[in-house]
């Protein structure tokens, strides 16, 4: 199935604005434009990879209490007590999404370096222990939502697939979009189990 030219054009503009905003180091606008592109055509080729690369940079920009990068957040790991095998799976999943050979975004190379550094620290028991001791207790911090966007404005819910916190997409709280899994989940009510996933 081919995408009509008008759709490609409408998605390409906010995507290009996102790339330009990223180059200007305006992460808030970057996410805003990428979200607009995703809303215009959720299945547009590469849009999920683009968003994941941007969110890696947003997570890396949020520092822990000792002004150190939160490597758990960079990898999208919610719990600091997560075992090495689960962290490895998350790293591999994200590496596929942000690898510069698979992701054409200007953010991809930097995102890949960030998740590689996170894996380097969190996969080595000694480095991880020292990092955890230096950083103190950790609570997962979600990337900030762009102003006026649906992200965070309607609350959040844990992704049924990867357990990462995701923001509701609408006022009725009937769906979430997980940037880590690249899946959208639709719920019958805000407290029901997923009705379907796309």
Image (cartoon, rainbow, N blue to C red):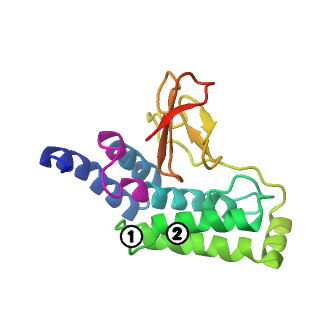
How far across and how far down the image is residue 85, in percent?
72, 67
The answer to whether residue 44 is seen in the rendering is: yes
Q: Earlier in the sequence, mark 2 or mark 1?
A: 2
Apparent side of residue 105 relative to residue 179 in the rendered image (left or right): left
Tell me the distance, in whole angstroms, between the alpha carbons under discs 2 and 1. Answer: 10 Å
**Residue hosting label 1:** 102
How many tags in the picture? 2
Apparent side of residue 93 relative to residue 81 in the rendered image (left or right): left
Apparent side of residue 125 relative to residue 21 in the rendered image (left or right): right
How far across and how far down the image is residue 134, in percent?
83, 68
Residue toward you, 127 or 48: 48
Residue sitting at x 61%, y 41%? 160
Q: Residue furthest left?
A: 5
Q: Which residues are magenta?
A: 37-50
Q: From the image, which quarter does the C terminus lie in?
A: top left
How far across and how far down the image is residue 83, in percent?
77, 63
**Residue hosting label 2:** 95
Residue sitting at x 69%, y 64%? 87
């Amino acid at each position: 199935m081919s995408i009509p030219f008008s759709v490609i054009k409408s998605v390409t503009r906010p995507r290009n604005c996102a790339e330009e905003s990223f180059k200007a180091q305006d992460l808030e606008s970057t996410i805003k434009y990428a979200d607009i592109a995703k809303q215009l055509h959720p299945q547009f080729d590469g849009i999920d990879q683009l968003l994941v690369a941007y969110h890696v940079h947003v997570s890396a920009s949020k520092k822990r209490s000792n002004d150190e990068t939160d490597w758990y957040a960079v990898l999208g790991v919610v719990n600091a007590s997560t075992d090495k095998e689960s962290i490895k799976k998350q790293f591999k999943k994200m590496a596929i999404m942000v690898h510069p050979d698979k992701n054409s975004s200007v953010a991809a190379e930097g995102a890949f370096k960030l998740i590689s550094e996170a894996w380097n620290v969190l996969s080595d028991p000694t480095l991880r222990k020292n990092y955890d001791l230096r950083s103190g207790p950790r609570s997962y911090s979600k990337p900030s939502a762009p102003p006026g966007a649906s992200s965070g404005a309607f609350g959040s819910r844990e992704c049924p697939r990867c357990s990462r916190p995701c923001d509701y997409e609408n006022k009725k709280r009937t769906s979430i979009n997980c940037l880590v899994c690249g899946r959208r989940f639709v719920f019958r009510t805000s407290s029901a189990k997923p009705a379907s996933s796309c």
